[in-house]
């Protein structure tokens, strides 16, 4: 047998790496989709309480953007953030336990669906206030600038947030101070029951970034590969220049705004039309046509996702409620206290 020497170059099969990566993207989107569908069921069973906003249809945005981020980068999200948390790598067990309100959750069950937070993953929430994450991201970016750290602070927010004062103040300061924020607008065309055209005088959203002198791009948010490549370019620009960038991802939510929404404001045919461009189905089709995914592989992928979710539910069910004696803990900050 030929002995391998230290100087022999590694044979890297680029083709295999690429196809593995594509399958990884598909798997990540499937994990989010199934997680969300299960959460809807658990909500009707009253295992999950409070408000619940699901991400079905928008998976390509979180998964695509997350590929461009490094472990040191920070993420700020909205109340529709399960997808970002899962794609960032926060264990599904921990996310599910948080949804159940159990102590084993990432916020000891005190945050729930809308307030997922995880220090280790630099995941700064989960925010119930529309536009509330925007100034936080600018603050995080200002800290990076002051400390001379080349990091990206990625802020996800909805089209509705762009009608809020906080969006305009944050864009203005980010541009003025030249701080590294990647603004990612998830334009799903609606803010609750209000279509974009009823709340924005100018519906071309990138124009708003242009008006602050912030570089921008708009991408098909149903195409995970397009999102990934736009996000790679945008994140590289933010990291290299230390300046903000605005990325609009045009997407659509397949489910209602929250669990209390009869959806009187949109036609079923419109929803069906968007479902024709389901990000998961589009990538599955692409991989299958290119011979990179067989039916057996897809079934195995789906099975592993189902098992992961079942395990997460079992973990959450077996979790503990925080004792009432601890009710006032964390009301004031306690330094050095872990999760
Ligand atoms: C400051 C503030 N105003 C109003 C609300 C009520 N509210 C909750 S979600 C929402 C719509 C936001 O839409 P968008 O930003 O497009 O996000 P999406 O739900 O579409 O992901 C509104 C108005 C709120 N939570 N915070
Ligand atoms: Mg919206």
Image (tube, rainbow, N blue to C red):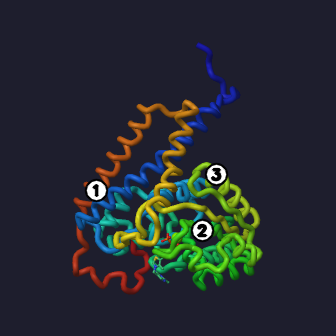
Q: Which residue is mark 3?
A: 226
- Residue drawn at 32 percent across, 82 percent down: 329
Q: Secondary structure at mark 1?
A: helix
Is 78 located above or below residue 32 in the figure?
below
- Residue drawn at 57 percent across, 72 percent down: 159
The quarter holding residue 109 reads bottom left
**In the image, which disc is placed on residue 185?**
2
Give the quarter of the figure containing the C terminus. bottom left
From the top left corner, tell me how far across and down residue 69 is, in percent: 60, 58
Q: Which residue is mark 1?
A: 313
Q: Nearer the viewer, mark 1 or mark 3?
A: 3
First along the sequence among labels 1 and 2: 2
As rendered, which of 101 and 79 lies closer to the eye? Answer: 79
- Residue drawn at 50 percent across, 41 percent down: 284
Can residue 70 be seen here? no
Q: Secondary structure at mark 3?
A: helix
From the top left corner, tell me how far across and down residue 297 is, in percent: 44, 34
Give the quarter of the figure containing the N terminus. top right
Residues packed near mark 3 inside 10 Å, few (<14), some (14 to 19) or many (20 plus): some
As rendered, which of 102 and 294 lies closer to the eye? Answer: 294
């Amino acid at each position: 047998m030929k002995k391998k020497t230290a100087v022999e170059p590694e044979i890297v099969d680029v083709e295999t790496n690429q196809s593995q990566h594509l399958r990884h993207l598909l798997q990540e989107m499937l994990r989010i989709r199934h997680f969300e569908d299960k959460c809807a069921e658990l909500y009707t069973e009253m295992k999950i309480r409070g408000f619940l906003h699901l991400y079905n249809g928008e998976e390509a945005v979180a998964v695509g953007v997350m590929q461009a981020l490094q472990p040191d980068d920070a993420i700020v999200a909205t109340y529709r953030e399960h997808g970002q948390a899962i794609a960032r790598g926060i264990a599904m067990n921990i996310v599910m336990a948080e949804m159940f309100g159990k102590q084993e959750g990432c916020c000891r069950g005190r945050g729930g669906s809308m307030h997922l937070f995880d220090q280790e993953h630099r995941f700064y929430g989960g925010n119930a206030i529309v536009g509330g994450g925007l100034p936080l991201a600018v603050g995080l970016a200002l800290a990076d600038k002051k400390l001379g750290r080349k990091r990206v602070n990625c802020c996800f927010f909805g089209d509705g947030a762009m009608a809020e004062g906080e969006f305009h103040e944050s864009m203005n300061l980010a541009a003025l101070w030249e701080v590294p924020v990647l603004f990612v607008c998830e334009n799903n065309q609606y803010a609750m029951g209000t279509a974009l055209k009823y709340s924005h005088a100018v519906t071309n959203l990138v124009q708003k970034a242009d008006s602050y002198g912030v570089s921008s791009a708009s991408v098909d948010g149903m195409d995970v590969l397009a999102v990934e490549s736009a996000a790679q370019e945008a994140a590289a620009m933010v990291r290299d220049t230390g300046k903000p960038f605005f990325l609009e991802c045009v997407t659509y939510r397949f489910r209602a705004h929250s669990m209390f929404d009869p959806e009187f404001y949109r036609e079923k045919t419109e929803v069906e039309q968007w479902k024709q461009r389901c990000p998961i189905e589009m990538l599955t089709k692409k991989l299958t046509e290119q011979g990179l995914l067989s039916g057996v592989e897809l079934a195995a992928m789906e099975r592993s996702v189902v098992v992961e979710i079942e395990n997460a539910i079992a973990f959450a069910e077996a979790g503990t409620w925080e004792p009432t004696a601890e009710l006032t803990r964390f009301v004031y900050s306690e330094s050095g206290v872990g999760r």
